[in-house]
Amino acid sequence: MLGRLLVKHLRPYWPLLLGVVVFQLGGSIASLYLPTLNADIIDQGVAKGDTHYILRTGMTMLVITFGQIVCSVIAVYFGARAAMSLGRDLRGSIFHRVGEFSEREVSKFGAPSLITRTTNDVQQVQMLVLMSCTLLVSTPILAIGGVIFAVRQDATLSWILVVAVPVLLVGIGLIITRMVPQFRKMQTRIDTINRVLREQLTGIRVVRAFVREPVEIARFDDANAAVTETALRAGRLFALMFPFVTLILNVSSVAVLWFGGHLINSGDLQVGSLVAFLSYLIQILMAVMMATFMAVLLPRASVSADRIGEVLETEPSVVAPASPVTIHGAAGRVELRGATFSYPGADQPVLQAVSFVALPGTTTAIIGSTGAGKTTLVNLLPRLFDVTGGAAFIDGVDVREVDPEELWSRIGLIPQKPYLFSGTVASNLRYGRPDATDDELWQALEIAQAKDFVSKMSEQLDAAIAQGGTNVSGGQRQRLAIARALVKRPEIYIFDDSFSALDTATDARLRAALDREVSDATRIVVAQRVSTILDADQIVVLEDGKVVGIGTHDELLLSSEEYAEIVQSQLSIEEAA
């Protein structure tokens, strides 16, 4: 997966990568040539007392060193540009793919894991590319070139390279094979600690209300300890690497000096050549060490690439049609024909053969016990889920045949848990229609019974809204979410238990305003309170995912035992009548 991911996303940046190779090649050649010049200074200049030769060769070394620095800087710049661009593209690809996911795929991965994959996992792959451009490209050049130049200085000592390099590779290979499983565990445990922390921050008021701080602290400590334990295991293995490399490097250097000293004593080797050979040996072993450093990054980046690829290769269960059908007119007639929905692996469907029609200018209420499938039912219309049986129609067209953008433009959904984005009141209200005027915003706020509290805010429409709307009450959040849908002016309104946080009087005023101001729209209301739906044109009663009654309030009191039980549990006989 790592290879395919890099090939696909680095292809547009091949000029930068080519520049990295060219300039790293230039810098490495310059680095390899310097020990040879140093040997010439010792053998031809110092040994013979030729000051002119020393100065001339020294100036050449300075020029080559400057060229090496320039090449390295340019190569690192190109590599950084390519790596950062890769990270940007990967994050964008994940974001766009997650944006195509239905509720099913989001639930499968979980929000904490998706956040980790978009941030930490992308960072691991990005770091691998950056370090590859900085170190890995020059490593084979230095290693192969070092061997060639070392053999040119003296072939007799080459057996030291034949012994040292394989020992170094085998030892580091054994260490890395033990590190790979730890890195795989690391990413999973980072997911866990993100999930725990996210839950605790989101539910901080619940934690405090139930005095569960000690329990949550212990739960976080467990997740934190698991990450620490895995990191320590990987760290201990990583800590073995550099001492091992240093040991091989020092033993090899001692061997070169020992055997090279005997060759110098016998007159078979010059001092400058010994110094150059030792420099090349160090370069070769340092190149191997850099390769091993990359090998440490590779397993973790490979695990991260697998996790990123899992997201990118997951096909959304809700897909746009190949040849979308346009809905003609703007009536807003909604029809469900035998709509059935099952979650993957579930024993039985959540919804079973649900059928009803919601006409424009009417209010259709959906009521039932907890878990009856009310929210799942209304989620079928905007295709947050796709039916697994039957069909859902808007103005006679199957919603699966409509372009999602057109479908969503016709529906105003106020979800069960209204969410506001960080910004202002105005920016949240304009979320579905950016060109809405201030007068239209105030009109929507008046219908949603939110004008009073917004007008009392110091900055009114420009008043700040925190992420999630946490700086306003639950009822205010619901009314702002309703106003946001009203600003959009769709043909179909879906209120998924959107009045639950409102008092009875505000609920009644809001419904009256809706009947007056959006009387031509199709209104589908999911509710728990019977008082909210008493005046609905038709009420659909759900029980265990099945429709057990359709009619008005008075009709259902006589024909539906399930509805009568719900009414009796909430209203007195006189109120129900």
Image (cartoon, grey):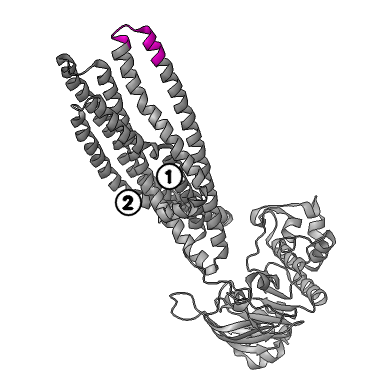
Q: Residue tagged by mark 2?
A: 181
Q: Residues within 10 Å of mark 2 (few under 14, many from 20)?
A: some
At a point 36% along the width and 46% down the height, the residue shown is 229
For residue 293, side relative to residue 329 (left or right): left
The quarter of the displayed image where residue 443 is located: bottom right
Spatial CA distance of label 2 from label 1 is 18 Å
Quadrant of image for the N terminus: bottom left
In the image, 292 versus 259, the foreground residue is: 259
Percent x, y of residue 539 = 67, 84
Percent x, y of residue 98 = 54, 61
Q: Residue tagged by mark 1?
A: 128
Q: Nearer the viewer, mark 2 or mark 1?
A: 1
Residue 531 shows in the view: no
Percent x, y of residue 240 = 29, 37
**Which amino acid, by three-letter code, is at mark 1?**
Leu
Q: Residues within 10 Å of mark 1 (few under 14, many from 20)?
A: many
At a point 44% along the width and 37% down the height, the residue shown is 134
Number of marks in the image? 2
Magenta span covers which residues? 45-57
